[in-house]
């Protein structure tokens, strides 16, 4: 197996796996999408806060949701852990907090 094939084998696009209904393998590099950008991460789980920071957003100004296969959207708490090996996670979306709240 060439280096390129090895890298392709280890980088898992969780959005593609969710759409195809395939089980996401553990201990790989995961390609996740936050808004329109894709990021490679070498961990199986991240918190909502870590996902926001990865996307260059601050938790005091944004919240983050995950979109699941079938269209369901679930809010992720800042300290809530999301594991990319969980079936059905397609992508993540950030939303600015309403400045008029509070």
Image (tube, helix red, strand yellow):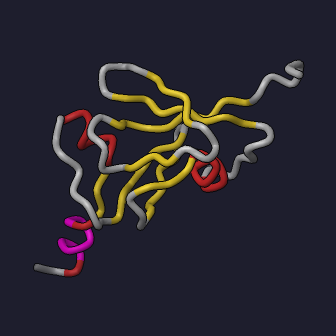
Q: Residue at x 26, y 39 (%)?
A: 87
- Look at the magenta stretch and give its main secondary structure: helix
Left or right: where 102 falls relative to 88: right
Whether residue 42 sits left or right of residue 9 in the image: it is right
Residue 75 position in % (x across, y down): 55, 29
Given the current orientation, which residue lies at the most extreme left position?
1
Question: Is 10 in the magenta?
Answer: no
Q: Which residues are magenta?
A: 4-9
- Image vertical order of residue 23 relative to residue 88, above or below: below
Rendered residue at 15%/80% (across/down): 2
Question: Which image quadrant: the C terminus?
Answer: top right
Residue at point 55%, 50% (across, down): 47
Q: Residue 5: say if magenta.
A: yes
Quadrant of residue 12 within the rendered picture: bottom left
Residue at 50%, 54% in the rendered image: 46
- Residue in the foreground of this view, choosing between 81 and 96: 81
**Quadrant, the N terminus:** bottom left
| Percent coordinates x, y for residue 92 in the rendering | 50, 37
């Amino acid at each position: 197996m060439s280096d390129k094939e090895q890298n392709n084998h280890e980088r898992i696009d969780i959005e593609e796996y969710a759409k195809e209904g395939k089980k996401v393998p553990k201990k790989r590099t995961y390609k996740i999408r936050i808004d329109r950008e894709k990021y490679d991460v070498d961990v199986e789980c991240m918190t909502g806060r870590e996902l926001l920071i990865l996307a260059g957003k601050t938790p005091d100004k944004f919240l983050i949701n995950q979109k699941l296969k079938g269209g369901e959207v679930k809010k992720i708490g800042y300290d809530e852990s999301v594991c990319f090996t969980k079936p059905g996670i397609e992508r993540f979306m950030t939303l600015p907090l309403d400045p008029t709240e509070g």
